[in-house]
Amino acid sequence: MPILLPGIRTAIAIVAALLALSPPASAQQSFPAPIRPAAVPARPAGAPSLRAASCHNGASFEKFLSELKQRAIAEGVSQQAIAEASPYLTYNQGIVNRDRGQRVFGQLFTEFAGRMAANYRMQNGQAHIRTYAAAFARAEKEYGVPPAVIAAFWGLESDFGANMGNLQVLPSLVSLAYDCRRSERFQNETIAALKIIDRGDLSPSEMIGSWAGELGQTQFLPTHYFTYAVDYDGDGRRNLLRSGPDVIGSTANYIANGLKWRRGEPWLEEIRLPQNFPYAQADLTIQLPRSKWITLGVTYPDGRALPSDNLPASVLLPMGRMGPAFLAYPNFAAYTEWNNSLIYSTTAAYLATRIAGAPPMRRPAGPVAQLPFNEIKELQQLLVRAGFDVGKVDGVLGQQSRTAVKAMQIKYGLPADSWPTAELLARMRGIPRAQPAAAALPPMR
């Protein structure tokens, strides 16, 4: 789930780190055939390459696995649980290749949300809330998380259990643990999976999920499963693959206690901005009370006034000033923690508002121009040359890139809505290499 690329997330790779989505359609098949290193033809099929062991002081997979099992025992996992899991703790180079070979494709928020927050998913969410009314009511009372918020994640991550993945999770976890890219993280995930087995929630053979190791109908990584899963149906197990009540209670527990949901507060509302709006203030890092946004001309889409109170909120423009506009409240941080892709998190929050009864968002008056992947990557390179830290130069418009874009828009006197344009790219192509980064305007108070 939230740490890396879960559920529906990898299925639809999108702008700004949709690296975190769950397995693509190809992942809903059997494991890819293990790949042998070409330089070592005698190596048995499925054996890890020598390069993969570099972060383990050259240790073989067998030695690494033995040490990982000892660490699990030291953390309280029983010998019996390890024995049950051992036939599944095998290396698969194909999983590592898939993890290293993920691609990202540009996609507009309205396109992604139009498909993923479509009417049928909204209606399914509402139907599930009716079907599991008692569990949703209990979860809201105990954790303060509204049913629509839980249902939206449930729908996006697995279409309410229809698409959880069909791969054995343990081989994926231990293969990614041996690989050096995120070894420590996946060692922890492997041990957490063993603890789930030891606790009696799932057997090793029941651990079927995504290639990246997520489990259940809201695609929990094992660490989250072990920490936040609750037994809501009273059968003595925490089964997030088969039990609707367990899914509801566990997801609410994670949102409330893992993502720090604020009881009784909104998360996202669509708004309308005036033509003279100061776009430099549209940023998730800038929070102003709703009373201040009123003085800047912000209203609801139909012209109704916002409540004149001190509830803090940020103006969110996922497609710049030409696209839809939202007020993102402190609870929106739970969505960006679940998945740090702005497109995914905004879509999940928007779907929750729709399930809760909000009308569809207004569509842009005309097409919103989007730079192609190669030009976003070029823009990132120019931003780095200008002195900005945009993280990885990968053609993905993440938060660091958006912040840098806004600073350069301010420098050139362009509307500072953080949306990269052909005009900005043309201006930046003339920047000398040593030019220092421009500073963004301070937030209004």
Image (cartoon, rainbow, N blue to C red):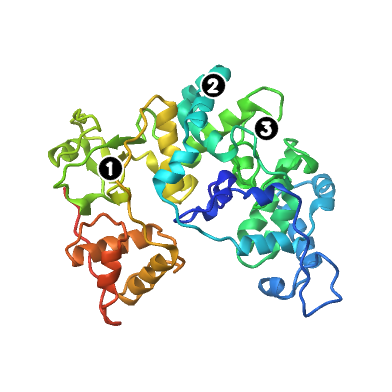
Asked if 156 appears above or below 376 in the picture, the reply is: above
Q: Could you say which is closer to the camera, residue 415 or residue 144?
A: 415
Nearer-the-camera pick, 271 or 64: 271
Query: Which residue lies under the disc numbered 3?
Result: 238
Query: Is residue 323 shown above or below 403?
Result: above
**Measuring 30% from the left and 40% from the top, which residue is drawn there?**
326
Task: Examine the rendered structure and indicate whether residue 153 appears above or below residue 15.
Answer: above
Q: Is residue 177 visible?
A: no
Proximity of marks 1 and 2: CB atoms separated by less than 8 Å? no
Q: Residue 180 placed where, x, y %?
A: 64, 68
Disc 2 or 3, which lies upstream in sequence?
2
Residue at 30% x, 82% y: name it: 433
Which SS class for mark 2? Answer: helix
Q: Kindly report the distance in space between the C-alpha atoms of the residues bearing marks 1 and 2.
A: 32 Å
The correct choice, above or below, for 432 with respect to 348 in the image is below
Instruction: Say left or right for 14 vs 296.
Output: right
For marks 2 and 3, give the CA distance.
23 Å
Using a 10 Å C-alpha cutoff, classify the residue at mark 2 as few (fewer than 14 neighbours), some (14 to 19) or many (20 or more): some
**The residue under label 3 is which amino acid type?**
Arg
Residue 380 drawn at (x, y percent): 38, 69
Q: Earlier in the sequence, mark 3 or mark 1?
A: 3
Give coordinates of residue 117: x percent, y percent. Answer: 47, 36
Q: Amino acid at mark 1?
A: Ala
Marks 3/1: CA–CA distance: 48 Å
Amino acid carrying mark 2 in the image: Ala
Which residue in the protein does label 2 denote?
Answer: 127
